[in-house]
Image (cartoon, helix red, strand yellow):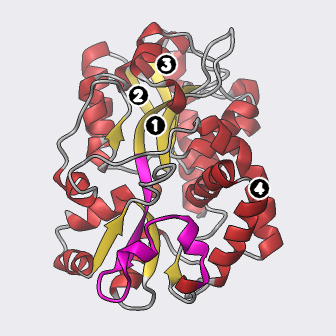
Amino acid sequence: MKSKVLALAFSAAAMAAGASHAQEQVLNLYSARHYSTDEALYSNFTKATGIRINRVDADDAGILARLKAEGAASPADVILLVDAARLYKGEVDGLFKPVKSAVLEEAIPAQYRGTTTAEGTPWFGFSTRARVVVYDKVRVKRQDVDTYEELGDPKNKGKICIRSGSHPYNLSLFGAVTEHLGEAKAQEWLKGLQANLARDPKGGDTDQIKAVAAGECQIAVSNTYYIARMMRSANPEDRAAMEKVAVVFPNQQSWGTHLNIAGGAVAKNSKNPANAVRFLEYLASPEAQNYFANGNNEWPTAKGVKVGNPALQAMSGGGDFKAETIPLTAVGANTVKVQQMLDRVGFK
Ligand code: FE
């Protein structure tokens, strides 16, 4: 832990030094993305523009805390986060510089953007991931888990494994459920879900899938890219685990499956805002969308860009599924309420 802090401090110093070479074009990126395919994304941008990218890696919460602590002295130009509620938090906390870009407005659908004002738009989503249900093929009937509502039904008692309720992915999912059902019903649902857990929440999404394959629980909730990663894994044990489970995209007959996003913003105190916007515009291009979205087994958000990803296609039964269409700003706005509901029902 300590070495990570030192590494971050060192890169900030390196960034400050880099910025003093006035001739060189640089872009300081704070990224919560942890995907190896992103290297190609950055080097292609540098090749095309001559702008060098300095990257600091941390998680969503760490990046937002750091931006706040650094204030006007922050060297950050571009922020990349992997959750809608966190992007919304950055917007509300005034950490982003609103962007006016015809390229981004044309490419990225409004539901995947922050709140547009006269000054511009604070953030843009560049890929989507669905939060779906994984279940034991033998012991669970598909019709018992094909809606989020049923995860809170007593018929699924003792069967469910899920990561911490306060993890951003779950806060966003529960924020979406709250938007669809209303607060009172959503809290009842959370109480039911909590009562249905096979064990106390622990680990990440992949751990929940493995727990279903190992028979420790029968139902799990996961982002689609973790499932695709296991389906395409070089490790035969991962592929064997995936043989034991099935995937369902919930709420196909009602409001649709919950989508989350990974997205980007220009830092409030960016010293290179024009280059920062250029980078975001690059992320909306078909080439970059292929690395940004498909490289991590996600769906691109840019209009007209499609990916041919066999794992995503197999998982979603051909590639088409009904996704929810509520604005992600509404999901983000609900997460404070959700955290209070989790505390009330004792969901860890
Ligand atoms: Fe993740």
Q: Is residue 62 left or right of residue 333?
A: left
Q: Is mark 3 within 8 Å of ligand 1?
A: no
Q: Residue at x 33, y 67 (%)?
A: 247
Disc 4 to disc 3, C-alpha distance? 38 Å
Front label number (3 vs 2):
3
Q: Residues within 10 Å of mark 1 (few under 14, many from 20)?
A: some
Q: Which residues are magenta?
A: 129-154
Q: Residues within 10 Å of mark 2 (few under 14, many from 20)?
A: some
The N terminus: image quadrant: bottom right
Q: Residue at x 54, y 46 (%)?
A: 83
In-front residue for pair 60/107:
107
Of the numbered discs in the image, which one, if any, rests on residue 183? 4
Going from N to C along the chain, the mark reached first, 1 or 4, is 1
Q: Are marks 1 and 2 in contact (CB under 8 Å)?
A: yes
Of the numbered discs in the image, which one, if any, rests on residue 55? 1
Q: Is residue 170 left or right of residue 233?
A: right
Q: Residue at x 67, y 21 (%)?
A: 269
